[in-house]
Image (cartoon, rainbow, N blue to C red):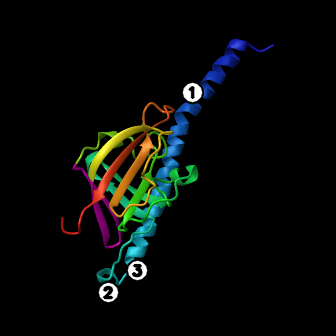
C-alpha cells in the first residue's frame, strides 16, 4: 500500500497550484478579450473618413471605452451583464440607456476576478470624472454620489428618468457579503 502521507502531500500541492493558476487564467482570458475588443474599436476608427468624424452622433453603442482616471481604470465595455459578458470586461446593462442618451447608463464589473476593473470603485469621490468614448464620440460624467446597498434593497437605477446619468455597480467586499457599491454620476454638457 502506498504512503497516505505522500498522496496527501501531492494532493495538497495540486490544490495549491489550482488556487494559484485560476486567478492567473481568469486575468489572462480577460486581457485577451480586452485586446481583441480594442483592436475592433481601432479598426472601426481606421475605416472612418473626415466627413464621418464631423457627423459623429450619439448615442455610443458597445463596445466602447470607459476611463475613470481617479482609480486608473481604462477598459472596453461589452454589451450585457451576464457572467459570460463580465468575463470579457465591464458590461453595459441593456435595461439602461446608451451613453449620450436621456436616462440612466448602467455599467457593471467584477471587483475581484476577470480584470477586477471596479476593485477601487468605492474610492471614487464626488467630482471625479468618468469618460465614455468611441471613435470621435465622447461623453463625460461627474460623480455625484457613492453608496453601498444590500443586493435585496430596492433601487431606482432602472426607473425611467429625463436626467442623463451613469450608474456603476460592483460587489462590495468581502466577496459574498450580498452588498453592492453604487456610484452615480451626471453627464456634463459638451463644453463643461
Q: Is residue 131 magenta?
A: yes
Q: Quadrant of the C terminus?
A: bottom left
- In the structure shown, which secondary structural element does the residue marked by tag 2 occupy? helix
Residue at horizontal 50%, vertical 59%?
95
Instruction: Residue 138: name its quadrant.
Output: bottom left
Q: Is residue 175 visible?
A: yes
Image height of 14 relative to 79, above or below: above
Q: CA distance from mark 3 to mark 2?
A: 12 Å
Image quarter for residue 173?
top left
> Residue 117, image x and y in percent?
40, 47
The magenta region covers: 127-142
Residue that mark 3 sits on: 47
Residue name at image x 35 percent, y 64 percent: 162
Q: Residues within 10 Å of mark 1 (few under 14, many from 20)?
A: few
Label 3 with label 2: CB-CB less than 8 Å:
no
Magenta-colored segment: predominant secondary structure: strand
Crowdedness near tag 3: few (<14), some (14–19) or many (≥20) residues, C-alpha within 10 Å: few
Q: Quadrant of the image for the N terminus? A: top right
Dot 2 corresponds to which residue? Answer: 51
Please name whichever residue, 113 or 144, is drawn nearer the observer in this view of the structure. Answer: 144
Amino acid at each position: 500500500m502506498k504512503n497516505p502521507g505522500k498522496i496527501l502531500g501531492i494532493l495538497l500541492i495540486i490544490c495549491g497550484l489550482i488556487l494559484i493558476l485560476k486567478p492567473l487564467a481568469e486575468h489572462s482570458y480577460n486581457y485577451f478579450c480586452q485586446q481583441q475588443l480594442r483592436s475592433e474599436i481601432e479598426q472601426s476608427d481606421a475605416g472612418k473618413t473626415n466627413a464621418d468624424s464631423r457627423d459623429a452622433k450619439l448615442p455610443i453603442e458597445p463596445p466602447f471605452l470607459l476611463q475613470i482616471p481617479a482609480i486608473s481604470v481604462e477598459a472596453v465595455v461589452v454589451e450585457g451583464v451576464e457572467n459570460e459578458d463580465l468575463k470579457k470586461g465591464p458590461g453595459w446593462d441593456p435595461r439602461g440607456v446608451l451613453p449620450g442618451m436621456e436616462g440612466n447608463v448602467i455599467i457593471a464589473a467584477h471587483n475581484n476576478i476577470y480584470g477586477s476593473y471596479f476593485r477601487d470603485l468605492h474610492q471614487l469621490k464626488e467630482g471625479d470624472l468618468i469618460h465614455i468614448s468611441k471613435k470621435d464620440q465622447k461623453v463625460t460624467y461627474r460623480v455625484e454620489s457613492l453608496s453601498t446597498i444590500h443586493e435585496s434593497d430596492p433601487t431606482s437605477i432602472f426607473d425611467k428618468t429625463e436626467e442623463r446619468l451613469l450608474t456603476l455597480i460592483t460587489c462590495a467586499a468581502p466577496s459574498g457579503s450580498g452588498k453592492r457599491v453604487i456610484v452615480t454620476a451626471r453627464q456634463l454638457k459638451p463644453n463643461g
